[in-house]
Image (tube, helix red, strand yellow):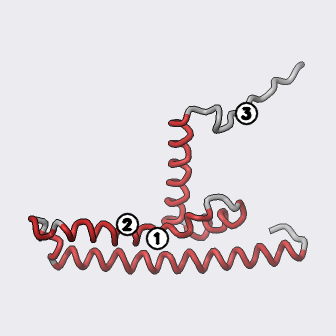
Amino acid sequence: MKSKKLKLVFPSKMKSAYWFFSLIYAMFEVIQGLFFHPYQTVQFLVKKKLFKILIFFPVFCLLFIYLLGLILGEFGQYGFLFLDSNWVVFIKYWIVYFCILWQMVLFYLFFRFWYAWRKSNKLGSVY
């Protein structure tokens, strides 16, 4: 019985829309994992060295909130006065504190697993 050869599809031969949506989907899955299961996801990211930049996702969220606040603040004098209400300010500060704490947890887990992975590789054992 002859074995069939597998045809590998590389991004250059893939349609660009499929490749783009596949990348977005993979990044969304990692971000969702960082939110719901940070311990397992950071361990996976340190082992596989894939999408390591997503460890900084809370910083990107803070930057987005800051820029959004600057843009909407410019329009505050033109009718968006609801941005100065107490609830909006409370929610904004709550999101900022949440992102800071989330980033601290991700940094702690990243350095913890990185150190353990580095130490186990020096000893020659399998992690």
- In the image, which is nearer the foreground, mark 3 or mark 2? 2
Name the residue at 40% across, 70% down: 63
Distance from disc 3 to disc 2, alpha carbons, whole Å, reads 38 Å
User: Dot 1: few (<14), some (14–19), or many (≥20) neighbours within 10 Å?
Assistant: many
Distance from disc 2 to disc 1, alpha carbons, whole Å, reads 10 Å
SS label for mark 3: loop
Return the x and y of residue 20 as percentages of the image width and height. 52, 42
Left or right of 105 on screen, residue 72: left
The reply to whether callout 2 and callout 1 are in contact (CB within 8 Å) is no
Report the front residue among 81 and 38.
81
User: Dot 2: few (<14), some (14–19), or many (≥20) neighbours within 10 Å?
Assistant: few
Type of amino acid under label 1:
Pro
First-in-chain label (2 vs 1): 1
Residue at the spot of label 3: 8
Type of amino acid under label 3:
Leu
Name the residue at 61% across, 59% down: 51
Type of amino acid under label 2:
Phe
> Which residue sits furthest top?
1
Name the residue at 81% across, 23% down: 4
In the rendered structure, find residue 64 and report the number of the disc placed on it: 2
First-in-chain label (1 vs 3): 3
In the rendered structure, find residue 58 and report the number of the disc placed on it: 1
- Quadrant location, the C terminus: bottom right
In the displayed structure, would residue 49 be above or below residue 81? above
Q: Quadrant of residue 124?
A: bottom right
Return the x and y of residue 80 as percentages of the image width and height. 13, 66
First-in-chain label (3 vs 2): 3
Left or right of 44 on screen, residue 74: left
Name the residue at 64% across, 38% down: 11
The reply to whether callout 3 and callout 2 are in contact (CB within 8 Å) is no
Return the x and y of residue 82 as percentages of the image width and height. 13, 70
Return the x and y of residue 65 as percentages of the image width and height. 34, 69
